[in-house]
Image (spheres, helix red, strand yellow):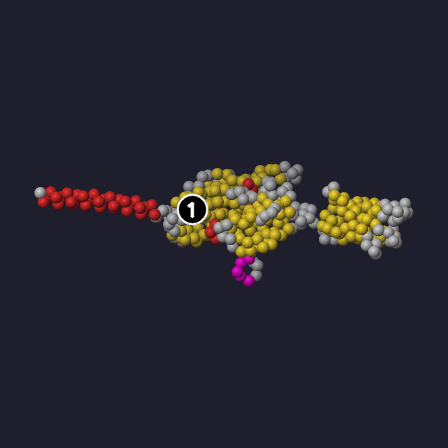
Amino acid sequence: MRVINKIKIFLLSLVFLCFFGCHNSESNNTNLQAPTITIKLVDESGDFEEVNIEVVDVMIKMDNNHDSENEWISLNSNQKIINLLDLTGGVHEVLVDKFPIPTGTLKQIRLVLGDHNTIVVKNNLDVGETHDLKTPSAQQSGLKLKVDTVIEEGFTYDFVIDFDVDKSVIIAGKSGNINLKPVMRVTTAVSSGIIEGTVLPSDEPVVASVINTKETPGTEDDEVISAYTNYTGDFALWGVPTRTYEVILTPIDSNSKYKVTTIADVEVTNGEITVIEPAIELALKTGTITGKILNKNVVVTASTIIDSNVMRADTNTEGVFLLDNVPIGVYKITLTPAKGSGLAIIELNNEEVREDETNDLGAITLPDA
């Protein structure tokens, strides 16, 4: 009887040990979750019709510094063709979404491209033509980006690959070949922020940019972070380190009637989106028109029509008139004397206004009416 009781106690102990052992094991597995990685692709800038790249895979390399192929880990990114110029105004392409990775130090990220890379550029007839983009180095070994980020359990790590199209597309002189030599940078959400804004008029193509000044003498290693506006005038600057910036808005067309416009004191905080509000109105390129009326004791009004609105200015006591901040262009200037002066109205045609210049019409005498 005593032996049987001992056996029962022993069996019950085993049951409790198994139960609590399994419970603790499951609890540990729940608490110690594998870290995950998310990788997004954005386009810094590019003045083409289309730039299409075929992404075959995204891979990472952990602690080991050796460059052996078997040390690269595939993140099982879906093979896809991406038009980089679609990635503007805050739009991004998710290449990898919360994929489990080992702990340790993430040394490099590799973007592997395929053979189906193309570019669309306009010809002399302003018609888009498709050309192959030659990417030999990318096809063979992939594009490697240094990261050196410590990966710990239980965290999700967000990386942004910023593809600078303008610097990456090389048109090879007489051969007619267009090569892709990718220039990219990689940032993390926790160590950078995003600047977003809208530019008006929305149909004016603009490059938005900030300068990330390094903590070193000189400007050789200063980094320009830029992005094109999309068709609604929106832009997004990704991977901007914490700091206060001046956002520079530069029209793409050098003959644009709008000039470079800047927005000062834009603060960026790591891991956050800074939205510039309200929408940014581009400043017009302007000049001045002046002249002197020689007729004595008469007030003359100089006027011109700008976008259906009338701009006017009266002469001062010395007979001088000044039309200031006139948008660049060619205008008809009308000089109208005060009623009862007995003088006639005159018109001066094809008077040009240039940026930051004064068109002096000189001394003018109005004829009798």
Observer able to see residue 345: yes
At 83% from the left and 45% from the top, the residue drawn is 347
- Whether residue 24 appears in magenta in the rendering, the answer is no
Q: As drawn, is 90 to the left or to the right of 315?
A: left
Q: Amino acid at mark 1?
A: Ile
Expressed as whole percent of the image width and height from the top left, the position of residue 184 reads 51, 49
Secondary structure mostly taken by the magenta-highlighted segment of the chain: loop
Residue 305, picture quadrant = top right
Which residue is farthest left?
A: 1
Expressed as whole percent of the image width and height from the top left, the position of residue 322 reads 78, 52
217 or 318, which lies in front? 318
At 74% from the left and 49% from the top, the residue drawn is 326
Observer able to see residue 204: no
Which residue is farthest front?
A: 340
Q: Quadrant of the C terminus?
A: top right
Secondary structure beneath dot 1 equals strand
Q: Quadrant of the N terminus?
A: top left
At 44% from the left and 42% from the top, the residue drawn is 97
Expressed as whole percent of the image width and height from the top left, the position of residue 60 reads 42, 47
131 or 72, which lies in front? 72
- Callout 1 environment at 10 Å: few (<14), some (14 to 19), or many (20+)? some
Q: As drawn, is 288 to the left or to the right of 118?
A: right
Q: Which residue is mark 1?
A: 37
Q: Which residues are magenta?
A: 213-217
280 or 225, which lies in front? 280
Which residue is farthest bottom?
A: 217
Give the mark count. Answer: 1
At 45% from the left and 47% from the top, the residue drawn is 158
Expressed as whole percent of the image width and height from the top left, the position of residue 246 reads 59, 54
